[in-house]
Image: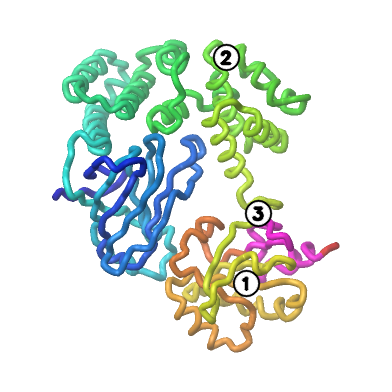
Amino acid sequence: MRLFGVFIFMLVFSVISNGQKTVIKGVAPGAERKIISLTAPGDLITFWEKPLISSRIDSTGHFSLSVDLDKTIKATISIEFHQAELFLEPSKVYDIRIGPLTYDENAEVNPFIQSQNLQLEATDYDPGELNNLIGEFDSVYSGFLMANFNGLYRDRKKALLDTFRVQLNQHFGAVKNSYFLDYASYKIASLEQLTQYYNQGQLAKKYFIDKPVLYTNVEYMDFFNSFFSKYMAATSNTIRKVDITALLKGPDPYKSVLKAMTVDTILKNEQLRELVMLKGLLEMYNAPLCPQKEILTVIEATKERTKYPGNRQVAEDIISLLTKLKPGTKAPEFKLLNRDQNEVSLKNFLGKPVVLGFWTTYCETCLSEMDLIKPLFDKYRENIHFVSVSADKYISKMIFFINLKKDYTWTFLNIGDQSEVLKDYDVHTYPLFVLIDREGKIFKYPAGQPSSGLEADLQKILEP
């Protein structure tokens, strides 16, 4: 067996055919009975994370995850906040051992800070497996770039790149894996851009014009994101002359913006043009004086009217990214244990506004704010639900604390192993308060703390 630290890509997996499902199975010593999850970005522009499957590791540390795939993707395997990335191909089995990790060490530290890279060990080593090919390619590529960066970037020595192509062909010329070949091709494209081996028009002709859009190939999309960065606003000599803001405020802005972009000869292909438009609108969204409402309208129209499923996914993810935790959007659902260790859902609180507060027993500010919740609870308890969510790893700590505080009679819940709730609410510091309306929609995020503005927020949400 070979052991590898996982930083960017997984390097070692055994792979066998397994019908239509992709399976990741193995053992994770020290993670017995913890949740193991598999996620992947819905697209490689927003990187909006989508859950694929999760399961509980058994009492012996063994796990098995099975997911239907119709294309190769780059996924993330997680135990709590500890992660590793890997490429998954359809209809294959990945048999791995996750290196021992003391998951409960520093349990009272913010999990966003304490997360570590998981380490993987394979039952067999296959040099022709995709993760190993990419790992080896990246190693060769990085070594070349480090040794020749000045020559490539400062001196524009194109001969260095020609020599490197010969080296790569000798090393990987026999590889037939189509994902790898595209990955390597667009990785080289980035070097060609760095060295100005080709001008922008030549690069576009070689890599984008009349070429398929490879939505799930990480190097294609990395090159796409680099090539079309600020393209609508600055890079394109033709589009930047168009008053996009005026078109966004005019009739049928979706059609108008797409039509205006046809002046750029690189974007004659409708699928590519629409994808570049989505990226450009995403980049424009937070610019000063930008018409955000109109931008969202065009992205919504793209989601509804596009002929291309990949572009629809990008549009959906951009909407999710730009509207997450915004007023009027649905508050992320959860099911957590209360002080009696009964499961409670956010849906249980529909009908009244909810003050949702995230805290821990080891956060001194949280404890002082908690004392200030008590008078607010006494004043508004008939009209508002107060829900304090403990991010302590063990529910026993929460119960011990609130048992000492006999007058803390509002709802207390514990995160336990449901760490995705912290991700859903972007909880990076404690305490954090969120105000949710009667229908389960975000009213204010973040809301004021009891010591600074929360009561004013409560009065607003109770207004008729």
Mark closer to the observer (1, 2): 1
Residue 276 rendering spot, x and y as whole percentages: 55, 25
In the rendered structure, the answer to whether residue 145 lies left or right of residue 203 reads: left
Kindly report the distance in space between the C-alpha atoms of the residues bearing marks 1 and 2: 54 Å
Q: Amino acid at mark 1?
A: Val
Q: Would you say residue 437 sits in the magenta stretch?
A: yes
In-front residue for pair 393/255: 255
Residues marked 1 and 2 touching at CB (< 8 Å):
no
Mark closer to the observer (3, 1): 3
Q: Quadrant of residue 80?
A: bottom left
Residue at mark 3: 330
Residue at mark 2: 237
Residue at mark 1: 387
In the rendered structure, the answer to whether residue 446 lies left or right of residue 165 reads: right
Residue 242 rendering spot, x and y as whole percentages: 67, 17
Q: Quadrant of residue 181?
A: top left
Q: Which residues are magenta?
A: 434-462
210 over 73 or under it: above or below: above
Residue 74 rendering spot, x and y as whole percentages: 37, 40
Residue farthest left in this picture: 1
N-terminal of the pair, mark 1 or mark 2, is 2
N-terminal of the pair, mark 2 or mark 3, is 2
Q: Residue at x 36, y 44 (%)?
A: 21
405 over 167 or under it: above or below: below
Q: Amino acid at mark 2?
A: Asn
Q: Residue at x 70, y 52 (%)?
A: 327
Q: Amino acid at mark 3?
A: Lys
Q: Quadrant of residue 348?
A: bottom right
| Label 1: few (<14), some (14–19) or many (≥20) C-alpha neighbours in 10 Å | many
Kindly report the distance in space between the C-alpha atoms of the residues bearing marks 2 and 3: 41 Å
